[in-house]
Image (cartoon, coloured by chain):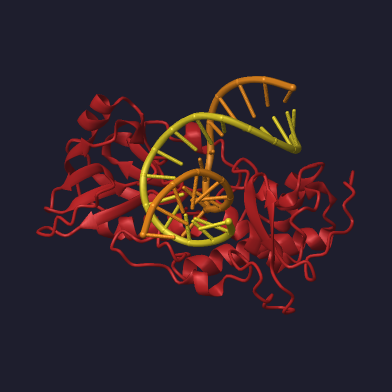
Chain colours: A red, B yellow, C orange
DNA sequence: CAACCGACCTGTTCGC
DNA sequence: TGCGAACAGGTCGGTT
């Protein structure tokens, strides 16, 4: 469910709510939510741990604890964090992990589909270093993107979903970025021209940045909600995602849906023409 | 690499 | 109304 913008907004919210707080204790209600270490060690290490920072890398929430421990949280499809008020234990029935905070509130990790995972580690970089570049970092330039695209023979949309290629882009923003760049989702990644690489870079960066400004995308099913129950607003700005048959905001042709890698892709066949699908060997 | 599959899970929507 | 199929914002591991 959440992609880079949603995870960024959640991490900022958790940071503002939890910085400097400590965990009194933790209760693990679904053992497999804990990827590492084992549940007993996870529980023991959490006792009294102080939260020193909350940031994001790719789709991971990175919670720095005192004594050099870090909790990495990946929400996958349906994970959510909730911070509950002191006297309002509005327990989410999908709570998988529950912490008590030293101010009386609780932090809940809720996850209907049980795909989400929490990792407690002293060397989170082992995991995070496997991710591709951060698309909103200064180092992610059009030239750097072009370099990574070189000789890649797969379809560009599928490549954008590969977290080793670039971190944080998911199914919504891959379609949106390609629409902004006016690039067909089935283009061979390594076949993009210099101007197309420029446009793709701008499309990825602008769509992610704008989605963060809008507080993320909360589709009709409201899977994505912030730790305080708020929703994002970017769904109103989506050009093509989940809009099959609707008019393209740029040219009014109907938005199409195709399947790539067993996942839906939305695009405008008029604005995003399939051409030049020959790999460059620069 | 790439294409494809199943696995991991539960809930909602859609077609008949 | 009921019921099964299809689908959902993600990723991993395995096979060909």
Q: Position of residue A231 (x, y in %)?
A: 38, 67
Q: Residue furthest left?
A: A87
Instruction: From the viewer's side, name the closer residue of A9 and A115.
Output: A115
Residue at figure coordinates x 68%, y 56% from the top left? A141
> Quadrant location of the C terminus of chain A?
top right
The answer to whether A90 is drawn above or below residue A148 in the figure is below
Residue at figure coordinates x 32%, y 52% from the top left? A81
Can see residue A135? no
Q: Position of residue A143 (x, y in %)?
A: 75, 54
Residue at figure coordinates x 22%, y 39% from the top left? A49
Residue at figure coordinates x 58%, y 64% from the top left? A242
Instruction: From the viewer's side, name the closer residue of A183 and A94.
Output: A94
Residue A161 is left or right of residue A74, and the answer is right
Q: Quadrant of residue B15?
A: bottom right
Q: Position of residue A123 (x, y in %)?
A: 42, 31
Can see residue A261? yes
Instruction: From the viewer's side, name the closer residue of A104 and A94.
Output: A94
Q: Position of residue C1 (x, y in %)?
A: 36, 59
Instruction: From the viewer's side, name the closer residue of A267 and A183.
Output: A267
Residue A247 is left or right of residue B8, and the answer is right
Q: Quadrant of residue A66?
A: top left
């Amino acid at each position: 469910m959440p992609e880079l913008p949603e995870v960024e907004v959640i991490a900022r919210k958790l940071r503002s709510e939890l910085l400097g707080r400590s965990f009194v204790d933790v209760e693990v209600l679904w053992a497999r939510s804990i990827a590492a270490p084992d549940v007993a060690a996870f529980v023991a290490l959490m006792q009294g741990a102080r939260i020193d920072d909350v940031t994001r890398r790719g789709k991971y929430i990175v919670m720095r604890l005192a004594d050099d421990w870090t909790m990495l949280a990946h929400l996958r499809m349906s994970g959510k964090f909730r911070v509950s008020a002191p006297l309002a234990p509005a327990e989410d029935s999908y709570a998988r992990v529950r912490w008590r905070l030293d101010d009386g509130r609780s932090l809940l990790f809720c996850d209907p589909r049980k795909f989400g995972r929490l990792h407690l580690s002293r060397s989170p970089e082992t995991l995070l270093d496997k991710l591709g570049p951060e698309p909103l970092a200064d180092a992610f330039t059009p030239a750097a993107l072009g370099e990574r695209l070189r000789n890649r023979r797969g379809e560009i949309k599928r490549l954008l979903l590969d977290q080793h290629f670039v971190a944080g882009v998911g199914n919504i923003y891959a379609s949106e970025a390609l629409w902004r760049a006016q690039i067909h989702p089935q283009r061979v990644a390594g076949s993009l021209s210099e101007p197309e690489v420029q446009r793709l870079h701008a499309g990825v960066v602008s769509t992610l940045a704008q989605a963060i400004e809008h507080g993320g995308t909360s589709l009709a099913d409201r899977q994505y909600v912030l730790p305080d129950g708020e929703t994002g607003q970017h769904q109103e700005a989506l050009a093509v995602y989940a809009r099959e048959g609707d008019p393209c905001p740029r040219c009014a042709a109907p938005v199409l849906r195709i399947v790539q890698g067993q996942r839906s892709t939305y695009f405008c066949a008029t604005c995003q023409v399939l051409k030049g699908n020959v790999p460059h060997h620069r």
